[in-house]
Each structure stands twice: as C-alpha cells, then as structure tokens.
Amino acid sequence: MNKIQQINDKELQSGILSPHQSWHNEYKDNAYIYIGNLNRELTEGDILTVFSEYGVPVDVILSRDENTGESQGFAYLKYEDQRSTILAVDNLNGFKIGGRALKIDHTFYRPKRSLQKYYEAVKEELDRDIVSKNNAEKLILAKKDQPN
Amino acid sequence: MALHQYLSETYGPTKPKNKTKKKKKESKSDANSDKTSLIVKERLSTLQQEQEKSGVASFSKFDKQKSKNIWKNLETNELSHAITHPSASSITGNESKNDLKEIRAQEPLVTVADKSKTRKTIYRDAQGHKIQEDSKIDDSSFSRSKYEDEKAAEREQYLKNLNMGDVQKLGINVDAHDKKKNQTASSLTIEDPAITFTHDKERTVKTSLLGRKLYDKPAPENRFAIMPGSRWDGVHRSNGFEEKWFAKQNEINEKKVQSYTLQEDY
C-alpha cells in the first residue's frame, strides 16, 4: 500500500471529492508526472500506450543510460490537461505492469541540455496526433474505404 | 789512500769481500766500522725531514721499505712522491663536501620563495596584463552576478511555462466548456429533429481541446470526463480508486435525498 494511496483513502473517507480541496491542488501548475519502478524492458511507446487512458500525452522522457541506451527504470510524462495527472496518480499508483508496482507522483520537470535531440524527436512523433482539416478529410476517406 | 776510501764508501758491500782476500784481517775490521757509521748518519737526516712533513702513515711506510731494501737511494725518492698523492686526494674530498653543504643550504631558500609566490593570486587581463586594483575585480564580479540573476529568472519563467498544462496555460475554462457542449447538444436534439440526417465530416474524428486525436471507441468513465488519447490500446488499467470515488459520490447524494425524505416524514 503506497503512501499516496493511503492519503487518497483518508480523503475519500472524509468526503473530499473536489480537486480544489484535495492535496492535488498544490500541484495545479504541474502537468508533468514522475513514473518510477518501471520494468526495464518498457519503451517510450509502451508508456504512452498505458498512460493515454487518462488523457492526451504531450511529452515523454524515459531515462536511459548514456552509454548503453538501456532504460534506468523511471520516466517523466506530460499531459495536455493538468487534470489528467490527478487521474493517473490516483488510478495507476501501485498498479502492476511487467510484474512491478508503479510509483507515480506529481513533479516539476527540469530539462537537460544533453537531451535536446531526444526532446525534438519525441515532439516530432507526438505532433503527428494533431488533426488539421486536410488530415481529417483523409482519415474520413480511409474509414469509408475500409467497409467497402 | 783517498781513492781506496772513496771506492769503499760507494761500493761497500761487494768490494770489501774481494779486498779481504788480498789484505790482512786487522784492516778489514776498521774499514767496516767506518762505513756503517757514515751510512747511519745519512738515513737519520732523511727520517727527520720526512717526519716533519707528514704523519705516522708515511713513517710506517718508510719503516717497511727500510726493512726490505736499505741500501737503495732511488727508493727514498719514490717514498716522497707516494706521500703527496693521498694528501692531495684528501684535500679534494674536503672541498666536495663543502660544496654539497652549500647546495643543501640554498635549497630551502628556493622553496620559501616558491611558497611566497603561491600565496598570492595574480589577476590578468585578456591581453595578459596584471590587474592590481581590487575595485576593478569587485565591479566585474558584481556585474556578473546581475547578469546571472537575470538569466536565472528567465530560466525559471521558462520552466514554469514548460511544466504548466497546455489547457490551463491557454486559460480555457473547462467546466464552462463542458456545460456549453451539453447545452448545445440538448437544444439541438430538442429543437431540430432533422439533425440525425445530417453528416458532418469534422465531427467523425474526435479531437481534444487543442486538436489532438482521441480514442474513438467507448472508454471507462472518469470524474473529469476526459477521453483517452488515440495511442491507448483499450485495456483498462486501474487500482480501483475511480470506482471508489464514484461510490462515495453516490453515497453522499443518497444521504442528501434521504435527509429530504425524512423531513417529509416529520
């Protein structure tokens, strides 16, 4: 049982349901979450797949060894809407993925200069989700063709 | 008589034997005694001179050679040469020792000078000139601190913008937005029954508030009505907190209703 889970249970018992009265209000300006105790075989794509359930991710940073490129077991993720961080922290804390219980918390992320290319690559990949009018039409045509 | 004496003195050991055969015995004994006395005098004079010059070592050497060959004059010259060499070598040894002492005395002075040099730090211009005034140094450090403070403030502001949610950053009032959505839907369905026949292309693709793709199939409910992103694989992962939240909410609502109904009972 995680400390955050204990705090959440106490708040529920006392009847606090609004995010403005909850402990999450201290982090209302932090859209990043810290994800710890990850299985070392999980990649950025896996993290995005799992955490997209609670909102649209806008940025992801998986900490990797500089020499070998292996995962170090922790990551940072940013949501488009800050309220998604509340959902992720409350619902995925202690959930087991790959045999390991996740540890999730709000955080204030400070980027590193050595990872500049990494940030650009991640942003380029995630910007593909942005829908413009032309893209929407293409998608509609594709969907129409599929059943035919 | 004079020639006889001269020859006997210079060639003493060999010639007296030959003469004794020819001459009488009495003359033999007298000649021998005279020769020995003369020789002894010469040796003593040389001994005294050598003792004055050198110490015991030379004396011992002289004694040894004396025992071996007494009658050779050349050996005395050799002895004098031998004595001079060791004295010369000893003198040179003393000089070398004195030089070493001087060197040792000089070394600590050099180290002291080095220490005094290392104590003070020398500030230099880009051109290499020394800066001796303290005021200049203070001014430069002060200006640097100002510049650094401004830079740090800018970076902090950048980090705040980075960490803030994009929706909150743009100032979108989420609650009002949701209400508007509900109102428009309800009004449209009520007032215009023909809406079912229209086919808007844009609405078929669900997008988030900022125009990103969303999951297009039904998804589990959450307290903020936030739809999942398009990268979700459809597997619901949760530790059960959201269900507890909804149960608690229902419980509170039921309590309100019951309190109202109980009032009617009274």
Image (cartoon, coloured by chain):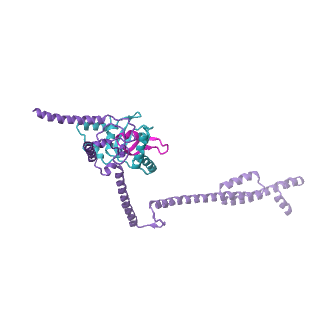
* A60 part of magenta stretch: yes
Q: Position of residue A128 (x, y in %)?
A: 42, 47
Which stretch is magenta?
Answer: A48-77
Whether residue B54 is visible, yes or no, is: no
Asked if residue B27 lies left or right of residue A3, the reply is: right
| Residue B95 location, quadrant | bottom right
Q: Position of residue A77 (x, y in %)?
A: 38, 44
Q: Position of residue B121 (x, y in %)?
A: 44, 61
Of B176 and B56, nearer the camera is B176
The N terminus of chain A is located in which quarter? top left
In the figure, the purple chain has which letter? B
The C terminus of chain A is located in which quarter? top left
Of B30 and B54, nearer the camera is B54
Toward the left, the furthest residue is B266
Whether residue B170 is visible, yes or no, is: yes
| Residue A11 location, quadrant | top left
In the figure, the cyan chain has which letter? A
* B188 part of magenta stretch: no
Q: How many marks?
A: 0
Asked if residue B237 lies left or right of residue B185, the reply is: right
| Residue B30 location, quadrant | bottom right
Q: Position of residue B173 (x, y in %)?
A: 28, 49
Of A120 and B106, nearer the camera is A120
Asked if residue B121 lies left or right of residue A107, the reply is: right
